[in-house]
Amino acid sequence: MSDPTLLVLASLAGGDQHGYGIMEDIERFAGVRLGPGTLYGAISRLEERGWIRAMASPDDRRRPYRLRAAGRRHLQEELAKLGKIVTTGLERLEAL
Amino acid sequence: MRWLIRLYPRRSRERYGAELEALLEDSSSGWRGCLDVAVAGLGLRLRTGTPMLAGALLGLGLGMAATYWMTPWQVTSFWVQESGRAFSQVEVGRAVARGLGRAELAKIIEKHRLFERERKWQPLEVVIAQFRQAITVDIERGGILVRYAGPHRNNMLAGDLLDLVLKQLVPKDRRGLRFHMRFGEEEAVRPYPIVLPLLGAMLGMAGALTSTRLQRKIR
């Protein structure tokens, strides 16, 4: 799983976070270090699709993001698909 | 870092510029982070804003990076040895032919670990020929001047080459010869030929134009 948008959604499923927090969180749970440009590319796409939204913050340079209901649904669907792939792959590996 | 953010189209810059800048400061991502931001900004311009300019800039950047990677530093190391005896051009020419043969150059390459990257994918003969081309031996005020112009900052290398030539010139009796030596470096340059960056810019513009036309057709 290396699609940055999916990684950002998975990170925000754990709670609101700003850019740096998301970057660190993704590195912790997925072992992938997203570059700042890649991260904000993903954030802008997710915001355009209405899957996440920026929260008000006293610091305009570090605004936290929140997962929206549509984003949660999309993440669930994608993870279900991934789950199927993982299960099938593991079953086939065991049968080898 | 602000100039990097300028690579983004205005709308994205106004919306995410400050956050991106803060993230660059917080994460201290170094050159990888800067490259990531530059590629993402230009990519966004390609898709939304000014594709021709973005294509040209992207191509120019890639061309420059390729040139930088492909063209190593060129340092000229030299070593002059004045021996108190004037050697003739013919004598020196013979000494070079005998002293800097294939086997001797191969030993020097091995000793100074030269051309390690090239040796992985080129036969040793080609590497030796390259090495030989980088060496010039001349007469200077009755002394021998050895110059090595290549990517290796290494004066001892020029000294070793000179030694091989001198062994041929004065093989046995060095008595009565007053050796005086000096060594140094000249012109440390990393040349930037313009061809690759220009070609990259042209290809980038052509790519951007094609992609815009394709997008229009699909719509």
Image (spheres, coloured by chain):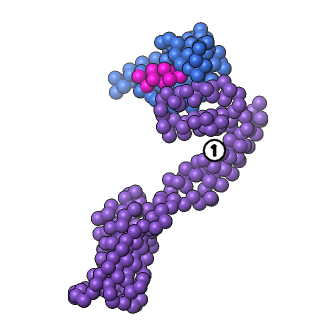
Chain colours: A blue, B purple
The image shows residue A17 at horizontal and vertical percentages of 52, 16
Please report the residue visible at 49 percent of the width from the left and 27 percent of the height from the top: B26
In this picture, is B99 found above or below B54?
A: below
Q: Which residues are magenta?
A: A19-28
Residue that extends furthest to the top in the rendered view of this protein: A69
In this picture, is B156 found above or below B56?
A: below
The image shows residue B1 at horizontal and vertical percentages of 57, 36
Question: Can you say which quadrant of the picture contains the C terminus of chain A?
Answer: top left
The image shows residue A88 at horizontal and vertical percentages of 43, 20
In the image, A92 versus A10, the foreground residue is: A10
In the image, B6 versus B44, the foreground residue is: B6
Q: Is residue B179 visible?
A: yes
- The reply, left or right, for residue B8 in relation to residue B135 is right
The secondary structure type at the circle numbered 1 is: helix
Please report the residue visible at 68 percent of the width from the left and 35 percent of the height from the top: B45
In reply to whether residue B185 is colored magenta, the answer given is no
Q: Tell me the residue that label 1 is attached to.
A: B58
| Crowdedness near tag 1: few (<14), some (14–19) or many (≥20) residues, C-alpha within 10 Å | many
In the image, B29 versus B130, the foreground residue is: B29
Subunit ID for the residue under disc 1: B
Q: Is residue A34 visible?
A: no
- Could you say which quadrant of the image residue B53 lies in? top right
Please report the residue visible at 39 percent of the width from the left and 76 percent of the height from the top: B146
Please report the residue visible at 40 percent of the width from the left and 57 percent of the height from the top: B117
Number of marks in the rendered image: 1
In this picture, is A81 found above or below B136?
A: above
In this picture, is A79 found above or below B4?
A: above
Name the amino acid, label 1: Leu
- The reply, left or right, for residue B14 in relation to residue B82 is right
Q: Main secondary structure of the magenta part?
A: helix
In the image, B113 versus B122, the foreground residue is: B113
